[in-house]
Image (cartoon, helix red, strand yellow):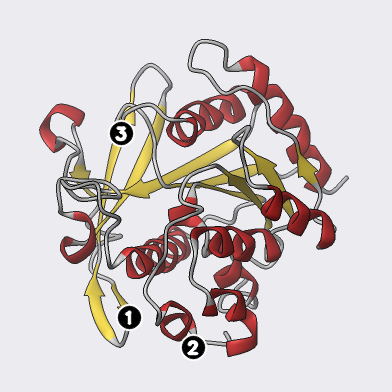
Amino acid sequence: MKAPVRILYISSEITPYIPESPSATVGRYMPQAAQENGMEIRSFMPKYGCINERRNQLHEVIRLSGMNIVVNDVDRPLVIKVASIPQARIQVYFIENEDYFKRKFVFRDEKDKFFADSDERAILFAKGTLETVKKLRWQPTIIHCSGWLAALVPLYLKKTFKADPIFTDSKIIVSIYDEIGKERFSSSFAKKIIANNIKPSDVELLNTPTGTNLAKIAVKYADGVIFGSKNVSKEITDFAAKEKIPSLAYSEITEGNTAAYTSKYIKFYGKFLKE
């Protein structure tokens, strides 16, 4: 009997928990489309403080909680919660940490300033999600990373987790959006990542810690890239071409016409499935 195709979605945003955006819309409707095409899915996002737990019926998954993730030499505790989107019949797992995700704003503060610890938030979300999937003992066929907060996942998979049997055969696809290209991260971003088989040369792009270079890191360690915005910078698209990463051009992403892009994404997945 042929093993089922399993798609792991790691998303910065998922609507209805976060207001609609191209990334949040993909996070919501791609898992549903994959499931309707006979695939098994798991979906992860951060548990931002603005998400109402009671209204969205989140509850803690005790058997998955209790891990500590080291970020910048400090142990950060994880709590894993889960909720369902009834109309889609899918579950969403939430990565919760009070230091990074309890605040009521998502990516920027009340003055619209990019959070100073955004680099550490990305590190914790990537490592925390992958450690949780290991604990689930659920082996994904394809891992689809959507949005900048998931941009480090490909790097960790190819370096830190490369020998882990849960991920050995997984193919990695990243969706890149016109999100934070002009934002700058901490000057020590690269230094914070170097550990567990990640060398300085692996992250030298982040010696200039811009949003554009973070996107390049995602592309560099991915097996495929989907351009999720019409205005993804030419610098990133040219980088993907130079790295010879298979890519899928932008398709309009709207909540009202999901088939227009989900069918193309499903077809793109097929390029990475073994016969």
Q: Which residue is mark 1?
A: 70
Which labelled disc corresponds to residue 166? Answer: none
Q: Report helix, strand or loop for mark 2.
A: loop
Q: Quadrant of the N terminus?
A: top right
Residue drawn where x is 76% and y is 37% of the image: 268
Q: In which quadrant of the rendered view does residue 161 lie?
A: bottom right
- Residue 231: quarter of image: top right
- Amino acid type indicated by mark 1: Val
Q: Are marks 1 and 2 in contact (CB under 8 Å)?
A: yes
Above or below, 89 against 248 in this view is above
Q: Position of residue 91 (x, y in %)?
A: 38, 35
Q: Residues within 10 Å of mark 2 (few under 14, many from 20)?
A: few
Dot 3 corresponds to which residue?
18
Please indicate, yes or no, whether residue 4 appears anywhere in the rendered image.
no
* Viewer-side label of 3, 1: 3
Q: Residue at x 75, y 59 (%)?
A: 239
**Which numbered disc, 3 or 1, marks the residue that appears first in the sequence?**
3
Q: Secondary structure at mark 3?
A: loop
The image quadrant where one finds the C terminus is top right
List the residue tagged with mark 2: 195
